[in-house]
Every structure is written in structure tokens, then in C-alpha cells.
Amino acid sequence: MHIETEAIRTQMERTQYSEHSAPVYLTSSYVFEDAEEMRASFSEEKERNIYSRFSNPNTSEFVEKVAKMEGAEAGYAFATGMSAVFSTLAALLNSGDHIVSARSVFGSTHSLLTKYFPKWNITHSYFNVNEPERIEDFIKPETKVIFAESPTNPGVDILDLERLGKIAKKHKLLLIIDNCFATPYLQNPIKYGADLVIHSATKLIDGQGRVLGGVTVGSSELIREIYFFSRNTGPALSPFNAWILSKSLETLPVRLEKHCENALKVAEFLENSEKAKQVKYPFLKSHPQYEIAKKQMKLGGNVVSFEIKGGLEAGRKFIDKVQLCSRSANLGDTRTIVTHPASTTHSKLKEEEQLEAGITPGLIRVSVGLEHVEDIINDLEQALKV
Ligand SMILES: *Cc1c(COP(=O)(O)O)cnc(C)c1O
């Protein structure tokens, strides 16, 4: 069936009350008929709920839905996007293993790779997203994983998933894609050879700025490893958040259509503005990887980045001047959000580290929401005026 239908009609079995919409199961544990059923459940002969750190009807429904939408066999849901990234890598890697990752990754993923994994002797090499032809130079005998996001945060660069899939296959590496910016509606990395797809469900999957969540989907074999690691270490998604997120997925396709339509108009407005330069949006013809974006994405997503003329000071002034748009570090909300990474999310980095991560002093990221696009553009226009 079509992805819109899967998003709505993937639903747990109805109870004796014949409810139309799935209820929330706030229960930490489950009961058994007898000793034999308990034995069979614990020995995995029988698949059923035992304890909500392992599984729960709401988390299972959410996971099944994301897996269907991504074209994956199985998945596991996490309390946050970061617990999904951490647990996925930690479950599959051993001391001595090496990760090849794009340099442009989410800030906390960068901290995992540079600060925490080295404690367990798991190392990494970064490649530049604008030099994909050099990726293979970083592969060593101990490399196990290629990790990347596309589009990237906050630079909105695009990586060629088909190219990554081929490299991973040739060198027998796991390809893990953080698909947060694209969502399962716009892009399905498994089609291009990804082994695992990770989402922070906190962003566009919730889409309304309410709850945190994460999910990893892929082959049953890999998910089994991740499941047992997580069942013992405890990063499970709460049933209540799973219920919210599964409901949110029902409207993901229609929300994304509008987010992307608004974002393209905002990008076109900025491209024609004298106050903005280097406007980046995957579906603008001027985007350096426009052709690749068109090939692998249904639409361009909801994030637009640009460089404000006047650098750091102009960036701070712009943030102060917006009236409708929210000043926040989040993204993927119904409300349009503007961020100035150099003075906020990436302010702890030294200037050369910022530049290496693609953060220029005047870089502005706009997460385009669902307000009327004329109101969004009017607000940006008045904030850009000096
Ligand atoms: C937000 C984000 C994460 C982390 O998700 P949380 O739910 O905040 O833990 C990971 N990757 C990307 C690309 C993100 O934008």
C-alpha cells in the first residue's frame, strides 16, 4: 500500500471495546496465564509483551509503522534521537572498531564520536560532505560503519546515498543513515543500500514540538542485536510518547507537503533578497547537490539555510528582530523557528572548528513551519531590514 495509507492504517489489534483509534497502554508489565506461558515467553518461543522496557503495544505500533514507511523489516523505539544513535552504534561495535562519518553531523553525535566512544577505543575519521570522492581514503581494515545524515544540519548539504550504499557494499561495511531531516516520507535510504535508518522522532515526526523520541529500523538480524542491547540498558520510548508519535505519523505526509511548499517559497524569497547570500535549500536549482537531491528526495524538506550579510552581528540582530518566528534551537515544528548557530548551538566551538563544520558567522537556519507562507516571509523581510 501507499505510504500515506500505511501511516494511517498500521494499527494494533482492537480490544473488546472496538475502539476506532488506538488507546494508550500505560502499563509497566504484563501478566501470564501460567508458568508454562511465562517460560515460553522468556525463552522467546512465544512472542508477547513481558515488560515495557522490552516492548509495549504502543511502541510496537509506532515501530511497525516507521519500518513499513522506510521499507525495513524491523525496528526498536527509543526515548530520544540521541539514545537511538548511541544504542545503535554501541550495540553493534566493539573495542577497536572504527567509524567513517561525515563531518557534518548533529552536535551530540559529534560529541559521541569525539569524546565518549574513544573511551571504549571506538574511533572515527571524518570526511567532508563536499568531498564525497575521498570517502574511501578514510576506510581502514578496522572500519565497521559508515555514518551520515542527509540533508545535513545546519548546512543542508546533500550526500549521495546511492554512492554511499555502493561504497559500503564494496567494503562490507554497515551504512547507517540519520534520516531525521528527510523523514520516512521524503527519503528512504534502505532503497539505496543503507543497513539501518535512524530518526529523531522529536523533530518532524512529532512535528508539533511536544515529545521526544527516536527510532532505528533495518534488518531483523541487526535489530535483534540492538533490541537485546537496549532491553538490558534501558533507553526505551515511553508508551505515552509512542502513542503521540504514532498519531503524528498519520498526518506526516500532508504536513510534509505543506512544510516543503512553504520552505521552497521562503528559499526563493531569500534568494531574491539583497540581505541574504548563499541560500541553501535542496530543491533550489542553485544548490550544489540539486541533482542528487532530486534523485533521492520526494521534496526538499523544511529547512533552509542562508548567510546574512554583515556576519555575526547581523545574525544576532536578525534573531532579535523576528516577531512571528520563534527563537529556538529545535526544528520540525508547526511554528517557524530561526536559529543562529554561531552564537548558540555551536558557540562553544573555536572559529576554525565552526568553519570546518560549515558554520559561518552569519549562518541562519530557518525551520519553516505551517503558518501562512506570506506571514512567514513578511516576518523574515522585516527582520532582515537594517
Ligand atoms: C535532533 C537531532 C538528533 C537528536 O535527537 P533528540 O531527539 O533531540 O535526541 C539526532 N540527529 C539529528 C539530525 C537531529 O536533528
Image: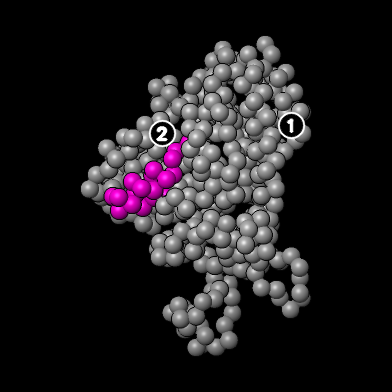
- For residue 79, side relative to residue 137 (left or right): right
Q: How many neighbours does mark 1 have within 10 angstroms: few (below 14), some (14-19), or many (20 or more)?
A: many
Please name the residue shown 36% across and 48% down the image. Answer: 166
Q: How is the image coloured?
A: one colour
Question: The N terminus is located in which quarter?
Answer: bottom right
Q: Which mark is residue 129?
A: 2
Is disc 2 placed on a helix, strand or loop? loop
352 relative to 117, above or below: above
Determine if residue 355 is in view.
Answer: yes
Residue 69 image point, x, y percent: 57, 57
Of residue 39 and residue 322, the one placed in the foreground of this image is: 322
Is disc 1 placed on a helix, strand or loop? helix
Of residue 336 and residue 1, the one placed in the foreground of this image is: 1
20 relative to 36, above or below: above
Question: The C terminus is located in which quarter?
Answer: top right
Q: Amino acid at mark 2?
A: Val
The answer to if 174 sits in the magenta stretch is yes
The residue pinned by badge 1 equals 373
Of residue 75 and residue 292, the one placed in the foreground of this image is: 292
Determine if residue 313 is in view.
Answer: no
Q: How many neighbours does mark 2 have within 10 angstroms: few (below 14), some (14-19), or many (20 or more)?
A: many
37 relative to 103, above or below: below
Q: Amino acid at mark 1?
A: Val
Q: Disc 1 and disc 2: Cα gap in Å?
A: 31 Å
Mark 1 Cβ and ligand 1 under 8 Å apart: no
Please name the residue shown 53% across and 65% down the image. Answer: 53
Work out whether mark 1 precedes mark 2 in sequence or the reverse, and give the earlier one.
Answer: 2
Residue 142 image point, x, y percent: 25, 49
Residue range (magenta) = 157-176
Mark 2 Cβ and ligand 1 under 8 Å apart: no
Please name the residue shown 70% across and 66% down the image. Answer: 22
